[in-house]
């Protein structure tokens, strides 16, 4: 069937890493990424690392696959010498039983941290009002965090969170490798300091023409020229196309101003994801189509967005966005929610690899 072939990018998504957004090779020990503007992603067993273009890194660990209750620990550290590690814990709430256990553990003084068989006190409870990220969860005190960081790289570390008869056990498999990668990415190995943070890039958005996409092509683009344009567009993507006379296969157009138009069409569809191809073209020949992405989900107000599930359960997702700056669609966001570990619908965390401050109208 037209358009139903598995998209090659989604093969990686099925592995739960959402790697089409953030995969990048790690540098040699002690060296920065070859291009920090690309971001960085690394995963090993039950742990993963995502560093964004400012060199802020986030390491997330999860329960083992055979564990009864889901849990995740997020460790965040900005670049620069002396930057502290911040930690937050999320309990799995994907199904009714797990959600009920997590709700009972919520509140101050309830969830207790155990490290290698020793109780280290209750965790602080963060409501969405007290947590600076607005996501709630649990926070570790400085002594608790130091105990966890000391234990994790060791073989057979036992990191547990307990309440009543329930035990949420954090896997240590992959922790040592991921924490080492974090140090490498931030230049903390073999040096007395660390690489400095990079500034957040500024992106000035162009004024949106305030018109949505429609099948109406630019003025002067007749049926014959439209067919030729469609053929030229699809030559740029190695994907099956929907029939041009079908609803899915039609071209949609949106004016961008300055003689530029956005043209899009549904390029592929899978079991739980689909992707629209989107190009910028000149309104008049030569149209010179420039492909922005073949993973688009929507376009509105000068912004192309992509939302893709890592699997049908939607416990891991990936986001990406491109903003029109008057000349091109510049990448303005890239993040994934972490491994597919049944922590929560939509994933446990936001792990960005590309952050931008968008300013403009």
Image (cartoon, rainbow, N blue to C red):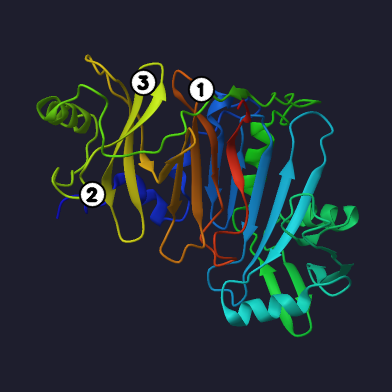
Q: Up-down: is 332 above or below 92?
A: above
Q: Position of residue 169 (x, y in %)?
A: 68, 70
Q: Are discs 2 and 3 less than 8 Å apart at CB?
A: no
Q: Which residue is mark 3?
A: 260
Spatial CA distance of label 3 from label 1 is 12 Å
Q: Position of residue 10 (x, y in %)?
A: 35, 50
Q: Which residue is mark 2?
A: 248
Name the residue at 71% across, 55% down: 154
Closer to us: 289 or 312: 289
Q: Specify whether residue 153 is in view.
A: no
Q: Which mark is residue 325?
A: 1
Name the residue at 63% across, 63% down: 171
Location of residue 118 (image quadrant): bottom right
Name the residue at 67% across, 31% down: 55
The residue carrying pointer 2 sits among few (fewer than 14), some (14 to 19) or many (20 or more) residues within 10 Å by Cα, namely some
Closer to us: 29 or 358: 358
Spatial CA distance of label 2 from label 1 is 28 Å
């Amino acid at each position: 069937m037209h358009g139903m072939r598995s998209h090659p990018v989604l093969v990686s998504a099925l592995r739960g890493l959402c790697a089409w957004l953030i995969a990048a090779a790690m540098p040699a020990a002690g060296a920065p990424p070859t291009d920090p503007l690309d971001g960085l992603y690394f995963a090993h067993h039950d742990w993963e690392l995502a560093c964004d273009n400012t060199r802020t890194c986030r390491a997330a660990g999860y329960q083992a696959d055979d564990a009864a209750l889901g849990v995740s620990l997020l460790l965040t550290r900005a670049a620069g010498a002396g930057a502290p590690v911040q930690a937050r814990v999320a309990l799995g709430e994907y199904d009714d039983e797990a959600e009920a256990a997590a709700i009972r553990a919520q509140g101050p003084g309830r969830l207790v941290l155990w490290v290698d068989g020793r109780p280290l006190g209750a965790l602080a409870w963060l409501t969405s009002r007290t947590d600076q990220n607005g996501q709630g969860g649990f926070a570790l005190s400085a002594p608790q965090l130091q105990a966890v960081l000391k234990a994790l790289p060791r073989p057979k570390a036992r990191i547990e969170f307990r309440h009543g008869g329930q035990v949420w056990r954090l896997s240590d498999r992959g922790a040592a490798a991921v924490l080492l990668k974090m140090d490498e990415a931030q230049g903390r190995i073999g040096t007395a300091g660390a690489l400095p943070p990079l500034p957040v890039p500024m992106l000035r958005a162009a004024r949106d023409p305030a018109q949505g996409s429609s099948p109406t092509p630019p003025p002067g683009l007749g049926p014959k020229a439209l067919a030729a344009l469609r053929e030229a567009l699809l030559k740029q993507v190695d994907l099956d196309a929907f029939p041009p006379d079908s609803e899915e296969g039609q071209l949609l157009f949106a004016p961008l101003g300055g003689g530029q138009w956005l043209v899009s069409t549904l390029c592929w569809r899978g079991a739980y994801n689909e992707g629209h191809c989107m190009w910028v073209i000149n309104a008049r020949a030569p149209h010179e189509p420039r492909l922005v992405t073949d993973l688009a989900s929507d376009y509105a107000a000068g912004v192309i967005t992509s939302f893709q599930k890592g699997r049908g359960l939607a416990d891991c997702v990936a986001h990406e966005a491109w903003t029109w700056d008057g000349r091109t669609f510049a990448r303005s966001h890239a993040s994934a929610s972490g491994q597919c570990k049944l922590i929560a619908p939509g994933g446990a965390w936001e792990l960005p690899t590309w952050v931008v401050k968008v300013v403009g109208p």
